[in-house]
Image (tube, coloured by chain):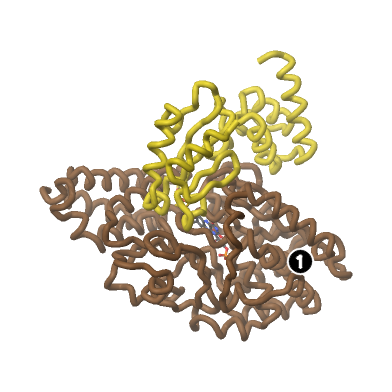
Amino acid sequence: MEVMTEKKIERKGPVLFSPYKRGEGIKAALKLKRNDILFEVKEAGLKGRGGAGFPTSAKWMLTAAAKSDKKYIVCNADEGEPGTFKDRVLLLEYPELVFEGMVIAGYTVGSDQGIVYLRGEYEYMLSSLEDYLKEMKKDNLLGDKILGTDFNFNINIHLGSGAYVCGEETALIESLEGHRGEPRNRPPYPVNTGFMGCPTVVNNVETLSSVPHIITKSGEWFKKHGTDKSTGSKLFSVSGDCNKPGVYELPWGTTIKELLKLVEAKDTKAVQVGGASGVCVPVNQFDRKLGFEDLATGGSIMIFNKKRDMLKVLKNFMEFFVEESCGQCTPCRIGNVKLLEGTEMIEKGTHTFKYINTLKELGKTMQVASKCGLGQSSPNSFISILDNFKEEIFSSGRNGGDKK
Amino acid sequence: MLLEEKNSLSEEIEKYVNEYGNNRAALMPILQAVQRNHNYVSDFAQQEVARMLDIHPVEVYSVISFYSFLHSKPRGRNIVRLCRTIACDMVGKDAVEKAVTRELGIGFGETTKDGKITLEFTNCLGMCDQGPAMIVNERVFVKLDPEKAINILNEIK
Ligand SMILES: Cc1cc2nc3c(=O)[nH]c(=O)nc-3n(C[C@H](O)[C@H](O)[C@H](O)COP(=O)(O)O)c2cc1C
Ligand code: SF4
Ligand code: FES
Protein backbone atom coordinates (compact mmCIF):
# COMPACT_ATOMS: atom_id res chain seq x y z
CA MET A 1 0.00 0.00 0.00
CA GLU A 2 1.54 3.26 -1.14
CA VAL A 3 0.95 5.30 1.96
CA MET A 4 2.42 2.55 4.08
CA THR A 5 5.70 2.74 2.23
CA GLU A 6 6.28 6.03 3.99
CA LYS A 7 8.57 5.18 6.86
CA LYS A 8 6.68 4.87 10.09
CA ILE A 9 7.31 8.11 11.84
CA GLU A 10 8.39 8.17 15.45
CA ARG A 11 5.57 10.24 16.83
CA LYS A 12 5.79 12.20 20.04
CA GLY A 13 3.07 14.06 21.86
CA PRO A 14 1.83 14.82 25.35
CA VAL A 15 -1.42 12.81 25.33
CA LEU A 16 -2.50 10.81 22.27
CA PHE A 17 1.02 9.94 21.20
CA SER A 18 2.16 9.22 24.76
CA PRO A 19 3.11 5.61 25.56
CA TYR A 20 0.22 3.14 25.63
CA LYS A 21 0.12 -0.62 25.90
CA ARG A 22 -2.46 -2.40 23.77
CA GLY A 23 -5.36 -3.69 25.88
CA GLU A 24 -4.57 -1.80 29.06
CA GLY A 25 -7.43 0.68 28.58
CA ILE A 26 -10.06 -2.05 28.27
CA LYS A 27 -8.56 -3.95 31.17
CA ALA A 28 -8.64 -0.89 33.43
CA ALA A 29 -12.14 0.13 32.31
CA LEU A 30 -13.71 -3.26 32.96
CA LYS A 31 -12.55 -3.05 36.57
CA LEU A 32 -14.34 0.26 37.01
CA LYS A 33 -18.00 0.96 37.58
CA ARG A 34 -19.77 2.65 34.67
CA ASN A 35 -20.35 5.79 36.70
CA ASP A 36 -16.68 5.98 37.58
CA ILE A 37 -15.77 6.01 33.90
CA LEU A 38 -18.32 8.74 33.23
CA PHE A 39 -16.85 10.67 36.12
CA GLU A 40 -13.30 10.30 34.82
CA VAL A 41 -14.25 11.44 31.29
CA LYS A 42 -16.11 14.36 32.81
CA GLU A 43 -13.18 15.23 35.04
CA ALA A 44 -10.92 15.19 31.96
CA GLY A 45 -13.17 17.78 30.34
CA LEU A 46 -12.96 15.91 27.03
CA LYS A 47 -14.81 17.67 24.22
CA GLY A 48 -15.63 16.28 20.77
CA ARG A 49 -12.74 16.48 18.34
CA GLY A 50 -14.91 16.29 15.21
CA GLY A 51 -15.34 20.04 15.24
CA ALA A 52 -18.45 20.80 17.28
CA GLY A 53 -16.79 20.32 20.67
CA PHE A 54 -19.73 18.82 22.53
CA PRO A 55 -18.68 17.44 25.96
CA THR A 56 -18.16 13.72 25.55
CA SER A 57 -19.23 12.80 29.07
CA ALA A 58 -22.60 14.53 28.54
CA LYS A 59 -23.17 12.63 25.29
CA TRP A 60 -22.32 9.34 26.98
CA MET A 61 -24.47 10.07 30.04
CA LEU A 62 -27.50 10.80 27.89
CA THR A 63 -27.02 7.57 25.97
CA ALA A 64 -26.40 5.62 29.16
CA ALA A 65 -29.61 7.03 30.64
CA ALA A 66 -31.70 6.27 27.55
CA LYS A 67 -33.82 3.14 27.97
CA SER A 68 -33.38 0.61 25.19
CA ASP A 69 -32.38 -3.01 24.65
CA LYS A 70 -30.08 -2.03 21.84
CA LYS A 71 -27.61 0.86 21.75
CA TYR A 72 -24.84 1.69 19.31
CA ILE A 73 -21.38 3.25 19.39
CA VAL A 74 -20.53 4.87 16.06
CA CYS A 75 -17.01 5.96 15.27
CA ASN A 76 -17.11 8.80 12.79
CA ALA A 77 -14.20 8.12 10.42
CA ASP A 78 -15.61 10.09 7.51
CA GLU A 79 -12.80 12.68 7.70
CA GLY A 80 -13.87 14.70 4.69
CA GLU A 81 -13.01 18.24 5.69
CA PRO A 82 -10.41 19.55 3.24
CA GLY A 83 -7.00 19.59 4.87
CA THR A 84 -7.83 17.01 7.54
CA PHE A 85 -5.92 13.73 7.73
CA LYS A 86 -5.24 13.10 11.42
CA ASP A 87 -7.87 10.36 11.66
CA ARG A 88 -6.01 8.57 8.87
CA VAL A 89 -2.91 8.51 11.08
CA LEU A 90 -4.85 7.30 14.12
CA LEU A 91 -6.55 4.52 12.15
CA LEU A 92 -3.37 3.35 10.46
CA GLU A 93 -0.89 3.72 13.29
CA TYR A 94 -2.98 3.67 16.48
CA PRO A 95 -5.95 1.36 15.82
CA GLU A 96 -5.66 0.14 19.42
CA LEU A 97 -6.66 3.58 20.70
CA VAL A 98 -9.62 3.96 18.32
CA PHE A 99 -11.11 0.51 18.85
CA GLU A 100 -10.46 0.34 22.59
CA GLY A 101 -12.10 3.75 22.91
CA MET A 102 -15.17 2.24 21.25
CA VAL A 103 -15.17 -0.80 23.54
CA ILE A 104 -14.89 1.42 26.61
CA ALA A 105 -17.70 3.65 25.32
CA GLY A 106 -19.83 0.54 24.75
CA TYR A 107 -19.21 -0.75 28.26
CA THR A 108 -20.00 2.65 29.75
CA VAL A 109 -23.32 3.29 28.01
CA GLY A 110 -24.48 -0.33 27.84
CA SER A 111 -24.01 -1.04 24.15
CA ASP A 112 -22.79 -4.28 22.59
CA GLN A 113 -22.33 -3.06 19.03
CA GLY A 114 -19.87 -0.61 17.52
CA ILE A 115 -19.83 0.62 13.94
CA VAL A 116 -16.98 2.43 12.24
CA TYR A 117 -18.18 4.65 9.39
CA LEU A 118 -15.06 4.69 7.24
CA ARG A 119 -15.00 7.11 4.31
CA GLY A 120 -14.92 5.39 0.91
CA GLU A 121 -11.64 7.12 0.13
CA TYR A 122 -10.07 5.11 2.97
CA GLU A 123 -11.08 1.72 1.57
CA TYR A 124 -7.39 0.87 1.29
CA MET A 125 -7.29 0.63 5.10
CA LEU A 126 -10.18 -1.77 5.33
CA SER A 127 -8.36 -5.09 5.30
CA SER A 128 -5.68 -4.05 7.79
CA LEU A 129 -8.35 -2.69 10.14
CA GLU A 130 -10.38 -5.88 9.83
CA ASP A 131 -7.26 -7.92 10.55
CA TYR A 132 -6.68 -5.83 13.63
CA LEU A 133 -10.23 -6.50 14.83
CA LYS A 134 -9.63 -10.24 14.40
CA GLU A 135 -6.50 -9.96 16.53
CA MET A 136 -8.47 -8.19 19.23
CA LYS A 137 -11.04 -10.98 19.13
CA LYS A 138 -8.32 -13.58 19.49
CA ASP A 139 -7.02 -11.77 22.55
CA ASN A 140 -10.54 -11.57 23.92
CA LEU A 141 -10.49 -7.75 23.81
CA LEU A 142 -13.55 -7.97 21.56
CA GLY A 143 -16.40 -10.44 21.12
CA ASP A 144 -18.20 -12.38 23.84
CA LYS A 145 -17.32 -12.17 27.52
CA ILE A 146 -14.48 -9.73 27.07
CA LEU A 147 -11.56 -10.55 29.39
CA GLY A 148 -13.71 -12.99 31.30
CA THR A 149 -16.42 -10.50 32.24
CA ASP A 150 -20.08 -10.54 31.21
CA PHE A 151 -19.54 -7.76 28.74
CA ASN A 152 -19.96 -8.47 24.98
CA PHE A 153 -18.98 -6.05 22.26
CA ASN A 154 -18.45 -6.31 18.52
CA ILE A 155 -17.28 -3.85 15.91
CA ASN A 156 -18.26 -3.68 12.22
CA ILE A 157 -16.77 -1.42 9.62
CA HIS A 158 -19.12 0.28 7.16
CA LEU A 159 -17.72 1.97 4.08
CA GLY A 160 -18.96 5.33 2.87
CA SER A 161 -19.25 6.13 -0.82
CA GLY A 162 -17.84 9.58 -1.30
CA ALA A 163 -20.11 12.17 0.29
CA TYR A 164 -18.67 14.84 2.59
CA VAL A 165 -22.03 15.56 4.20
CA CYS A 166 -22.15 11.99 5.58
CA GLY A 167 -19.68 13.17 8.23
CA GLU A 168 -22.60 15.08 9.75
CA GLU A 169 -23.85 12.69 12.40
CA THR A 170 -27.49 12.42 11.36
CA ALA A 171 -26.57 12.13 7.67
CA LEU A 172 -24.12 9.43 8.69
CA ILE A 173 -26.92 7.53 10.40
CA GLU A 174 -29.17 7.90 7.35
CA SER A 175 -26.34 6.51 5.26
CA LEU A 176 -25.82 3.59 7.65
CA GLU A 177 -29.51 2.79 7.33
CA GLY A 178 -29.18 2.56 3.55
CA HIS A 179 -30.55 5.95 2.59
CA ARG A 180 -29.27 9.08 0.91
CA GLY A 181 -26.99 10.92 3.33
CA GLU A 182 -29.37 13.77 4.04
CA PRO A 183 -29.12 15.35 7.52
CA ARG A 184 -32.15 14.95 9.78
CA ASN A 185 -33.91 17.59 11.78
CA ARG A 186 -32.65 17.68 15.36
CA PRO A 187 -34.04 17.06 17.96
CA PRO A 188 -34.37 14.16 18.37
CA TYR A 189 -30.66 13.71 18.85
CA PRO A 190 -28.83 10.45 18.14
CA VAL A 191 -28.28 9.92 21.88
CA ASN A 192 -32.01 9.08 22.02
CA THR A 193 -32.98 8.25 18.44
CA GLY A 194 -29.99 7.21 16.41
CA PHE A 195 -29.15 4.21 14.26
CA MET A 196 -32.33 2.13 13.71
CA GLY A 197 -34.08 4.43 16.15
CA CYS A 198 -31.86 3.27 19.02
CA PRO A 199 -29.77 5.44 21.35
CA THR A 200 -26.45 6.03 19.61
CA VAL A 201 -23.18 7.67 20.52
CA VAL A 202 -21.47 9.25 17.51
CA ASN A 203 -17.88 10.22 18.26
CA ASN A 204 -14.96 11.30 16.17
CA VAL A 205 -11.96 8.97 15.80
CA GLU A 206 -9.75 11.29 17.84
CA THR A 207 -12.30 11.71 20.63
CA LEU A 208 -12.52 7.95 21.06
CA SER A 209 -8.74 7.63 20.89
CA SER A 210 -8.36 9.97 23.87
CA VAL A 211 -10.46 7.72 26.09
CA PRO A 212 -8.01 4.83 26.74
CA HIS A 213 -5.41 7.37 27.86
CA ILE A 214 -7.90 9.06 30.20
CA ILE A 215 -8.88 5.73 31.73
CA THR A 216 -5.31 4.56 32.28
CA LYS A 217 -3.76 7.88 33.25
CA SER A 218 -6.75 9.74 34.82
CA GLY A 219 -8.85 12.73 33.92
CA GLU A 220 -6.73 14.83 36.21
CA TRP A 221 -3.65 14.03 34.11
CA PHE A 222 -5.48 14.76 30.84
CA LYS A 223 -6.67 18.11 32.14
CA LYS A 224 -3.13 19.22 32.94
CA HIS A 225 -2.60 19.72 29.23
CA GLY A 226 -4.31 22.47 27.30
CA THR A 227 -6.36 25.34 28.74
CA ASP A 228 -9.29 25.65 31.15
CA LYS A 229 -11.98 25.27 28.52
CA SER A 230 -9.97 23.21 26.04
CA THR A 231 -8.42 20.39 27.97
CA GLY A 232 -5.92 17.90 26.63
CA SER A 233 -4.16 18.06 23.33
CA LYS A 234 -5.23 18.25 19.72
CA LEU A 235 -4.00 16.65 16.55
CA PHE A 236 -3.42 19.20 13.83
CA SER A 237 -3.27 18.21 10.17
CA VAL A 238 -0.87 20.69 8.66
CA SER A 239 -0.59 21.18 4.90
CA GLY A 240 0.26 23.90 2.41
CA ASP A 241 3.29 26.17 2.34
CA CYS A 242 5.69 24.84 4.96
CA ASN A 243 8.73 22.59 5.13
CA LYS A 244 7.21 20.02 7.43
CA PRO A 245 3.59 19.19 6.64
CA GLY A 246 2.06 16.35 8.64
CA VAL A 247 0.17 15.51 11.81
CA TYR A 248 1.21 17.27 15.03
CA GLU A 249 -0.02 16.74 18.55
CA LEU A 250 -0.01 20.04 20.41
CA PRO A 251 -1.65 21.23 23.60
CA TRP A 252 -4.75 23.33 23.04
CA GLY A 253 -3.91 27.00 23.44
CA THR A 254 -0.98 26.90 21.04
CA THR A 255 -0.89 30.07 18.94
CA ILE A 256 -0.82 30.10 15.16
CA LYS A 257 2.59 31.76 15.33
CA GLU A 258 4.00 28.93 17.43
CA LEU A 259 2.58 26.33 15.11
CA LEU A 260 3.99 28.04 12.02
CA LYS A 261 7.42 28.07 13.59
CA LEU A 262 7.23 24.39 14.39
CA VAL A 263 6.32 23.37 10.84
CA GLU A 264 8.88 25.78 9.36
CA ALA A 265 6.52 27.98 7.40
CA LYS A 266 8.01 31.09 5.82
CA ASP A 267 6.47 34.21 4.32
CA THR A 268 3.07 33.11 5.51
CA LYS A 269 0.22 35.35 4.47
CA ALA A 270 -2.79 33.41 5.68
CA VAL A 271 -3.76 30.33 7.64
CA GLN A 272 -7.04 28.56 6.99
CA VAL A 273 -8.13 27.06 10.31
CA GLY A 274 -10.81 24.36 10.23
CA GLY A 275 -10.76 23.50 6.55
CA ALA A 276 -13.08 24.84 3.89
CA SER A 277 -15.80 25.41 6.50
CA GLY A 278 -13.37 27.16 8.85
CA VAL A 279 -12.01 30.69 8.83
CA CYS A 280 -9.08 32.34 7.13
CA VAL A 281 -6.75 34.10 9.54
CA PRO A 282 -4.48 36.92 8.26
CA VAL A 283 -0.95 37.78 9.50
CA ASN A 284 -2.05 40.41 12.01
CA GLN A 285 -4.04 37.77 13.92
CA PHE A 286 -1.34 35.10 14.19
CA ASP A 287 -1.25 35.54 17.98
CA ARG A 288 -4.68 33.93 18.18
CA LYS A 289 -4.91 30.68 20.08
CA LEU A 290 -6.16 27.33 18.81
CA GLY A 291 -8.88 26.21 21.21
CA PHE A 292 -12.61 26.34 21.92
CA GLU A 293 -12.14 29.82 23.48
CA ASP A 294 -10.90 31.35 20.25
CA LEU A 295 -10.21 29.30 17.12
CA ALA A 296 -12.13 26.06 17.57
CA THR A 297 -11.23 23.50 14.95
CA GLY A 298 -11.32 19.86 13.98
CA GLY A 299 -7.63 20.29 13.28
CA SER A 300 -7.23 21.29 9.64
CA ILE A 301 -4.48 23.88 9.20
CA MET A 302 -3.71 25.02 5.66
CA ILE A 303 -0.88 27.47 5.19
CA PHE A 304 -0.66 30.02 2.37
CA ASN A 305 2.47 32.05 1.64
CA LYS A 306 2.75 35.47 0.03
CA LYS A 307 2.70 34.08 -3.48
CA ARG A 308 -0.76 32.53 -3.18
CA ASP A 309 -3.86 34.02 -4.72
CA MET A 310 -6.50 34.03 -1.99
CA LEU A 311 -9.33 34.39 -4.51
CA LYS A 312 -8.26 31.13 -6.08
CA VAL A 313 -8.32 29.52 -2.64
CA LEU A 314 -11.81 30.86 -2.05
CA LYS A 315 -13.02 29.61 -5.43
CA ASN A 316 -11.67 26.13 -4.69
CA PHE A 317 -13.60 26.07 -1.39
CA MET A 318 -16.84 27.30 -2.94
CA GLU A 319 -16.64 24.69 -5.69
CA PHE A 320 -16.27 22.12 -2.95
CA PHE A 321 -19.45 23.24 -1.21
CA VAL A 322 -21.51 23.48 -4.38
CA GLU A 323 -20.59 19.90 -5.09
CA GLU A 324 -21.03 18.56 -1.57
CA SER A 325 -24.28 20.29 -0.54
CA CYS A 326 -26.90 17.56 -0.22
CA GLY A 327 -29.44 19.90 -1.78
CA GLN A 328 -32.09 19.28 0.83
CA CYS A 329 -32.58 22.88 1.94
CA THR A 330 -32.69 26.03 -0.15
CA PRO A 331 -30.28 28.39 1.65
CA CYS A 332 -27.44 25.93 1.18
CA ARG A 333 -28.38 24.49 -2.22
CA ILE A 334 -28.87 27.87 -3.91
CA GLY A 335 -26.70 29.94 -1.58
CA ASN A 336 -23.45 28.16 -2.31
CA VAL A 337 -24.02 28.43 -6.06
CA LYS A 338 -24.56 32.19 -5.67
CA LEU A 339 -21.41 32.57 -3.56
CA LEU A 340 -19.41 30.67 -6.17
CA GLU A 341 -20.83 32.81 -8.98
CA GLY A 342 -19.90 35.91 -6.98
CA THR A 343 -16.35 34.62 -6.59
CA GLU A 344 -16.14 34.04 -10.35
CA MET A 345 -17.44 37.55 -11.00
CA ILE A 346 -14.60 38.98 -8.94
CA GLU A 347 -12.20 36.75 -10.85
CA LYS A 348 -13.45 38.14 -14.15
CA GLY A 349 -13.84 41.67 -12.84
CA THR A 350 -17.56 41.83 -13.55
CA HIS A 351 -18.70 42.29 -9.95
CA THR A 352 -20.12 45.34 -8.24
CA PHE A 353 -19.41 46.00 -4.56
CA LYS A 354 -23.11 46.40 -4.03
CA TYR A 355 -23.66 42.83 -5.21
CA ILE A 356 -20.74 41.44 -3.20
CA ASN A 357 -22.21 43.03 -0.08
CA THR A 358 -25.56 41.46 -0.90
CA LEU A 359 -23.77 38.11 -1.12
CA LYS A 360 -22.15 38.63 2.28
CA GLU A 361 -25.62 39.24 3.68
CA LEU A 362 -26.80 36.07 1.95
CA GLY A 363 -23.90 34.28 3.64
CA LYS A 364 -25.12 35.48 7.02
CA THR A 365 -28.61 34.25 6.21
CA MET A 366 -27.19 30.85 5.27
CA GLN A 367 -25.38 30.69 8.61
CA VAL A 368 -28.68 30.89 10.46
CA ALA A 369 -31.17 29.39 8.01
CA SER A 370 -29.39 26.25 6.80
CA LYS A 371 -30.47 22.92 8.18
CA CYS A 372 -27.07 21.48 9.02
CA GLY A 373 -23.50 22.52 9.70
CA LEU A 374 -22.50 22.35 6.04
CA GLY A 375 -24.66 25.27 4.94
CA GLN A 376 -24.20 27.01 8.28
CA SER A 377 -20.44 27.12 7.90
CA SER A 378 -19.79 27.22 4.15
CA PRO A 379 -20.12 31.04 4.05
CA ASN A 380 -17.34 31.37 6.68
CA SER A 381 -14.58 31.23 4.08
CA PHE A 382 -16.40 33.57 1.71
CA ILE A 383 -16.89 36.20 4.37
CA SER A 384 -13.50 35.88 6.09
CA ILE A 385 -11.41 35.75 2.91
CA LEU A 386 -13.18 38.70 1.27
CA ASP A 387 -12.97 40.73 4.48
CA ASN A 388 -9.39 39.91 5.44
CA PHE A 389 -7.83 40.04 2.01
CA LYS A 390 -9.86 42.76 0.34
CA GLU A 391 -6.83 44.81 -0.70
CA GLU A 392 -5.30 41.89 -2.51
CA ILE A 393 -8.52 40.65 -4.03
CA PHE A 394 -9.93 43.97 -5.19
CA SER A 395 -6.60 45.57 -6.11
CA SER A 396 -5.37 46.62 -9.53
CA GLY A 397 -3.18 43.54 -9.82
CA ARG A 398 -6.17 41.40 -10.45
CA ASN A 399 -7.80 41.10 -13.81
CA GLY A 400 -9.82 44.31 -13.86
CA GLY A 401 -10.95 43.92 -10.28
CA ASP A 402 -10.27 47.60 -9.65
CA LYS A 403 -12.48 48.92 -12.39
CA LYS A 404 -15.77 48.36 -10.72
CA MET B 1 -27.92 -8.16 -21.79
CA LEU B 2 -27.94 -11.88 -22.53
CA LEU B 3 -30.13 -14.10 -20.45
CA GLU B 4 -27.07 -15.94 -19.20
CA GLU B 5 -25.46 -12.71 -18.03
CA LYS B 6 -28.67 -11.76 -16.29
CA ASN B 7 -28.81 -15.07 -14.50
CA SER B 8 -25.24 -14.83 -13.32
CA LEU B 9 -25.73 -11.24 -12.15
CA SER B 10 -28.83 -12.31 -10.23
CA GLU B 11 -26.87 -15.10 -8.62
CA GLU B 12 -24.09 -12.72 -7.73
CA ILE B 13 -26.50 -10.27 -6.11
CA GLU B 14 -28.20 -13.08 -4.23
CA LYS B 15 -24.82 -14.00 -2.80
CA TYR B 16 -24.30 -10.42 -1.55
CA VAL B 17 -27.78 -10.36 -0.06
CA ASN B 18 -27.02 -13.57 1.82
CA GLU B 19 -23.78 -12.08 3.06
CA TYR B 20 -24.95 -8.60 4.06
CA GLY B 21 -28.60 -9.28 4.92
CA ASN B 22 -31.90 -8.66 3.17
CA ASN B 23 -32.68 -5.45 4.99
CA ARG B 24 -32.43 -1.82 4.02
CA ALA B 25 -29.22 -1.24 5.99
CA ALA B 26 -27.54 -3.80 3.75
CA LEU B 27 -28.30 -1.73 0.64
CA MET B 28 -25.05 0.25 0.55
CA PRO B 29 -22.71 -2.72 1.10
CA ILE B 30 -24.59 -4.64 -1.60
CA LEU B 31 -24.39 -1.76 -4.09
CA GLN B 32 -20.72 -1.25 -3.23
CA ALA B 33 -20.05 -4.93 -3.92
CA VAL B 34 -21.81 -4.81 -7.30
CA GLN B 35 -19.97 -1.63 -8.16
CA ARG B 36 -16.61 -3.12 -7.14
CA ASN B 37 -17.12 -6.00 -9.54
CA HIS B 38 -18.70 -4.15 -12.49
CA ASN B 39 -17.74 -0.51 -11.90
CA TYR B 40 -21.39 0.48 -12.15
CA VAL B 41 -24.80 -0.72 -11.06
CA SER B 42 -26.89 -1.47 -14.15
CA ASP B 43 -30.66 -0.99 -14.41
CA PHE B 44 -31.10 -4.72 -14.19
CA ALA B 45 -28.86 -4.96 -11.12
CA GLN B 46 -30.86 -2.16 -9.49
CA GLN B 47 -34.13 -4.01 -10.15
CA GLU B 48 -32.73 -7.22 -8.73
CA VAL B 49 -31.41 -5.52 -5.60
CA ALA B 50 -34.77 -3.80 -5.14
CA ARG B 51 -36.65 -7.08 -5.61
CA MET B 52 -34.51 -8.97 -3.13
CA LEU B 53 -34.64 -6.22 -0.47
CA ASP B 54 -38.33 -5.66 -1.16
CA ILE B 55 -37.98 -1.94 -1.83
CA HIS B 56 -38.93 0.16 -4.86
CA PRO B 57 -36.28 0.36 -7.65
CA VAL B 58 -36.56 4.15 -7.49
CA GLU B 59 -35.27 3.98 -3.91
CA VAL B 60 -32.22 2.11 -5.11
CA TYR B 61 -31.63 4.61 -7.89
CA SER B 62 -32.02 7.57 -5.54
CA VAL B 63 -29.31 6.16 -3.29
CA ILE B 64 -26.95 5.52 -6.20
CA SER B 65 -27.45 9.03 -7.54
CA PHE B 66 -26.61 10.56 -4.15
CA TYR B 67 -23.15 9.07 -3.65
CA SER B 68 -20.28 10.14 -5.86
CA PHE B 69 -18.68 6.68 -5.74
CA LEU B 70 -21.80 4.86 -6.99
CA HIS B 71 -22.78 4.93 -10.65
CA SER B 72 -25.70 3.81 -12.78
CA LYS B 73 -23.94 4.13 -16.15
CA PRO B 74 -21.11 1.93 -17.47
CA ARG B 75 -17.58 3.19 -16.90
CA GLY B 76 -14.01 2.11 -17.43
CA ARG B 77 -12.54 -0.99 -15.84
CA ASN B 78 -10.27 1.20 -13.73
CA ILE B 79 -11.29 4.41 -12.06
CA VAL B 80 -8.64 7.07 -11.60
CA ARG B 81 -9.55 9.92 -9.28
CA LEU B 82 -7.29 12.93 -8.96
CA CYS B 83 -7.70 15.21 -5.94
CA ARG B 84 -8.55 18.76 -6.94
CA THR B 85 -8.80 20.33 -3.48
CA ILE B 86 -6.57 23.25 -2.63
CA ALA B 87 -3.67 21.55 -0.80
CA CYS B 88 -3.02 19.30 -3.80
CA ASP B 89 -3.71 22.16 -6.17
CA MET B 90 -0.89 24.15 -4.57
CA VAL B 91 1.72 21.46 -5.08
CA GLY B 92 1.27 20.60 -8.73
CA LYS B 93 -2.12 19.04 -9.40
CA ASP B 94 -2.46 21.09 -12.61
CA ALA B 95 0.70 19.63 -14.13
CA VAL B 96 -0.45 16.10 -13.33
CA GLU B 97 -3.90 16.83 -14.74
CA LYS B 98 -2.49 18.14 -18.02
CA ALA B 99 -0.05 15.26 -18.40
CA VAL B 100 -2.72 12.66 -17.78
CA THR B 101 -5.23 14.15 -20.22
CA ARG B 102 -2.52 14.47 -22.88
CA GLU B 103 -1.30 10.93 -22.43
CA LEU B 104 -4.72 9.27 -22.42
CA GLY B 105 -6.27 11.60 -24.95
CA ILE B 106 -9.40 12.08 -22.85
CA GLY B 107 -10.64 14.70 -20.45
CA PHE B 108 -11.71 14.31 -16.85
CA GLY B 109 -15.15 12.76 -16.63
CA GLU B 110 -14.39 10.63 -19.71
CA THR B 111 -13.42 7.02 -20.40
CA THR B 112 -10.74 5.78 -22.80
CA LYS B 113 -12.02 4.16 -26.01
CA ASP B 114 -10.77 0.73 -24.97
CA GLY B 115 -12.80 1.05 -21.78
CA LYS B 116 -9.73 0.70 -19.64
CA ILE B 117 -9.64 3.94 -17.68
CA THR B 118 -12.17 6.51 -16.48
CA LEU B 119 -10.70 9.80 -15.27
CA GLU B 120 -12.42 11.76 -12.54
CA PHE B 121 -11.75 14.55 -10.12
CA THR B 122 -12.43 14.04 -6.46
CA ASN B 123 -12.35 16.16 -3.33
CA CYS B 124 -9.75 15.97 -0.58
CA LEU B 125 -8.52 12.41 -0.08
CA GLY B 126 -6.94 13.01 3.32
CA MET B 127 -3.42 12.95 1.87
CA CYS B 128 -2.89 16.70 1.86
CA ASP B 129 0.54 16.42 3.51
CA GLN B 130 1.73 14.31 0.58
CA GLY B 131 0.00 15.81 -2.45
CA PRO B 132 -0.69 15.73 -5.29
CA ALA B 133 -2.70 12.60 -4.53
CA MET B 134 -4.86 10.27 -6.57
CA ILE B 135 -6.77 7.05 -6.07
CA VAL B 136 -6.70 4.26 -8.63
CA ASN B 137 -9.63 1.96 -7.85
CA GLU B 138 -9.01 1.89 -4.10
CA ARG B 139 -5.23 2.28 -4.01
CA VAL B 140 -3.78 5.64 -3.06
CA PHE B 141 -0.80 7.24 -4.77
CA VAL B 142 0.88 10.32 -3.36
CA LYS B 143 3.55 12.90 -4.13
CA LEU B 144 2.74 12.65 -7.82
CA ASP B 145 4.48 14.44 -10.61
CA PRO B 146 3.57 14.10 -14.29
CA GLU B 147 5.99 11.28 -14.98
CA LYS B 148 5.12 9.30 -11.89
CA ALA B 149 1.40 9.62 -12.67
CA ILE B 150 1.87 8.41 -16.25
CA ASN B 151 3.95 5.45 -15.09
CA ILE B 152 1.18 4.45 -12.71
CA LEU B 153 -1.42 4.67 -15.50
CA ASN B 154 0.74 2.60 -17.81
CA GLU B 155 0.88 -0.19 -15.28
CA ILE B 156 -2.88 -0.45 -15.07
CA LYS B 157 -4.22 -3.52 -16.79
C1 LIG C 1 -20.93 18.75 6.96
C2 LIG C 1 -20.37 18.13 8.20
C3 LIG C 1 -19.34 17.21 8.11
C4 LIG C 1 -18.81 16.61 9.23
N1 LIG C 1 -17.81 15.72 9.08
C5 LIG C 1 -17.30 15.11 10.17
C6 LIG C 1 -16.27 14.13 10.04
O1 LIG C 1 -15.81 13.83 8.93
N2 LIG C 1 -15.80 13.54 11.16
C7 LIG C 1 -16.29 13.84 12.39
O2 LIG C 1 -15.85 13.27 13.37
N3 LIG C 1 -17.26 14.75 12.55
C8 LIG C 1 -17.78 15.38 11.47
N4 LIG C 1 -18.79 16.30 11.64
C9 LIG C 1 -19.31 16.54 13.00
C10 LIG C 1 -20.34 15.48 13.39
O3 LIG C 1 -21.62 15.91 12.98
C11 LIG C 1 -20.40 15.24 14.89
O4 LIG C 1 -20.50 16.45 15.53
C12 LIG C 1 -19.21 14.51 15.44
O5 LIG C 1 -19.01 13.30 14.76
C13 LIG C 1 -19.41 14.23 16.90
O6 LIG C 1 -18.28 13.59 17.44
P1 LIG C 1 -17.40 14.31 18.56
O7 LIG C 1 -18.33 14.83 19.59
O8 LIG C 1 -16.52 13.22 19.05
O9 LIG C 1 -16.66 15.40 17.86
C14 LIG C 1 -19.31 16.93 10.51
C15 LIG C 1 -20.33 17.87 10.62
C16 LIG C 1 -20.85 18.47 9.49
C17 LIG C 1 -21.94 19.47 9.64
S1 SF4 D 1 -27.35 22.77 4.92
FE1 SF4 D 1 -26.76 21.93 2.92
S2 SF4 D 1 -25.91 19.92 3.39
FE2 SF4 D 1 -27.04 20.59 5.22
S3 SF4 D 1 -29.12 19.74 4.95
FE3 SF4 D 1 -29.17 21.77 4.01
S4 SF4 D 1 -28.67 21.41 1.84
FE4 SF4 D 1 -28.06 19.57 2.96
S1 FES E 1 -6.21 18.34 -0.72
FE1 FES E 1 -5.69 16.62 -1.92
S2 FES E 1 -5.66 15.08 -0.44
FE2 FES E 1 -6.33 16.77 0.74
Q: Quadrant of residue A333?
A: top left
Residue A355 on image: x %, y % = 20, 49
Protein chain holding label 1 = A
Instruction: State the hue of chain B.
Output: yellow
**Labels in figure, total:** 1
Q: Colour of chain A?
A: brown
Give the residue at x 55% y 27%: B116
Q: Nearer the viewer, residue A1 or B80?
A: A1
Say which of B33 and A46 sits in front.
B33
The percent position of residue B119, horizontal first and vertical second, equals: 48, 34
Residue at 59% in and 77% down: A15
**Which residue lies under the disc numbered 1?**
A110
On the question of residue A373 being in view, the answer is no
In this image, A23 relative to A5: left or right? Answer: right
Where disc 1 sits, the SS reads loop
Judging depth in this view, the residue of B130 and B146 nearest the camera is B146
Q: Looking at the image, which residue is at 60% across and 73% down?
A: A16
The vertical placement of A123 against A49, above or below, is above
User: Left or right: where does residue A152 sit relative to residue A183?
Assistant: right
